Image: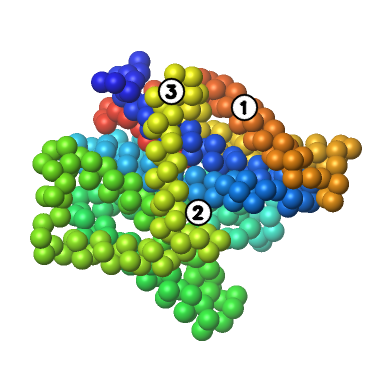
Amino acid sequence: MPGVAVSSTGSTRVLALDAVRGIAIICVIATHSLSITVAATASYEFPPAVFRTFDMAQFGVPLFFALSGWLMFSLYTGDRQFTQGVYWSRRIARIWPLWIIFLVASYLFYTVPETGLPIWAMMLIGLLFLGWMSPATVVYPLGGITIQQEMAHYLLFALFRRRGVAFFALTAIIGFLSLFATEFLLGRVEPGSTFASVLEAWLRLNLFRTWPFFLVGGAAFVIVRSWKEKGITDLLPMRSRSGVAVLIALGLWMFVTYAQETPSYLVLGFIIVAAGIAIAGNTIPVLGPILRSIGRYSYFMYFFHFWVLRWIENGYRNSDLPEGNTTSAIYNVGLLLTILLVTTAVSWAAGWVSWRLLEKRVLDFAHRRVPGPTRSPAAQG
């Protein structure tokens, strides 16, 4: 099949989806490179179009969520059969090894947060993807909140995958309603109480805003599959409760912001455009292999690029390079592009090593030990 690679273990890998991963991680690195450039130079002197473009690149994370939804629905719905052992062996084999490494490294090389708990307890909470329960531990490792959200997506999908369209739409509606209810209750409970802490933790996890993007990716796969099999007109029967639930969920989604007061439908537009660019870029002889290679190592790159950017920022601050009012828009754009290219290249090289020495071996072991559906979706890569 064109665009599909077959590994030594017999697994299939859709190359175009690797290209989408590549675009997504480049977007994430780009927006964080903008933040580091501003922090290093203490200057917002940028052409408005450049600043807006790099700022919008923050929505590479929802693109990852949507891509994950597509892959999960493609692997574990329809006629495909799987056991919970197969399912979770894939998830753990892909997520946990790097998660452990970067979580432990974060506690070793950065300041340990003050939570009143011993460090082993904080690390245990983190290893179980429960760091979001405390504002002090949610940032360990850097960028880890999105992986915790993704693990929650995996759990919900495992519980609900046999349900219909209406049920999934209902889960999104309940999520949005929980946001309104939580904000209402927080204004009426005693600050600092246990109940208030639980409510704040739910807002911190932010699942009501990320789960719909996962479902959008799954819906996109279901629509494409239906289109191929029997025509898209048969996807939702006339007078179907599913259609009503989907419309309500989409209506709520349009008015619930994702981040920085950006409406969710604009984020969805970014996802569609970015995915389209990736799929088109995948067909270009030189660009396609680059995007696919970056996408293959994107999970490692997601964690590691935070470290590279910190090193770059510290190096810049210790240098004699200009800061603040001494920088111009041209200088800042040049610095921004340099940081983006260096961070991407260094993170890719480290990811290449990690894939060959660790990640691929763990995945191959999991595939041999627990045979099942072959293509394994990645969290942030």
Which badge, 1 or 3, is on the more N-terminal residue?
Answer: 3
Left or right placement of residue 271 versus residue 233 in this view: right
Looking at the image, the residue that sits furthest to the top is 8
Residue at x 57% of width, y 27% of height: 348
Secondary structure category for the residue under label 1? helix
Kindly state the secondary structure of the residue where label 2 is placed: loop
Q: What amino acid type is highlighted by mark number 3?
A: Ile
Task: Work out whether 109 lies above or below 137.
Answer: above
Q: Which residue corresponds to mark 2?
A: 130
Question: Residue 64 falls in which quadrant of the image?
Answer: top left
Could you say where residue 14 lies in the image, as x and y percent from the top left? 34, 28
Q: Nearer the viewer, residue 64 or 175?
A: 64
Q: Nearer the viewer, mark 1 or mark 2?
A: 1
Dot in front, 2 or 3: 3
Please tell me which residue is depicted at 45% across the width and 53% down the height of the picture.
267
What residue sits right under mark 1 in the picture? 345
Q: Residue 37's spot in the image, x, y percent? A: 72, 44
Mark 1 near mark 2, Cβ–Cβ under 8 Å? no
Looking at the rendered structure, the secondary structure element under dot 3 is: loop
Query: Which residue is located at x 29 percent, y 28 percent?
Result: 374
Q: Is residue 162 left or right of residue 187?
A: left
Left or right of 74: which side holds 202?
right
- In which quadrant will I find the N terminus? top left
Q: Residues within 10 Å of mark 2 (few under 14, many from 20)?
A: many
- Does residue 366 show up? no
Choose the circle earlier in sequence order: 1 or 2.
2
Check disc 2 and give the amino acid type: Leu
The colour scheme applied to this rendered structure is rainbow
- Between 265 and 25, the one lying in front of the other is 265
Horizontal and vertical percent for residue 204?
Answer: 52, 62
Tell me which amino acid carries mark 1: Ala
For residue 284, the mark is 3
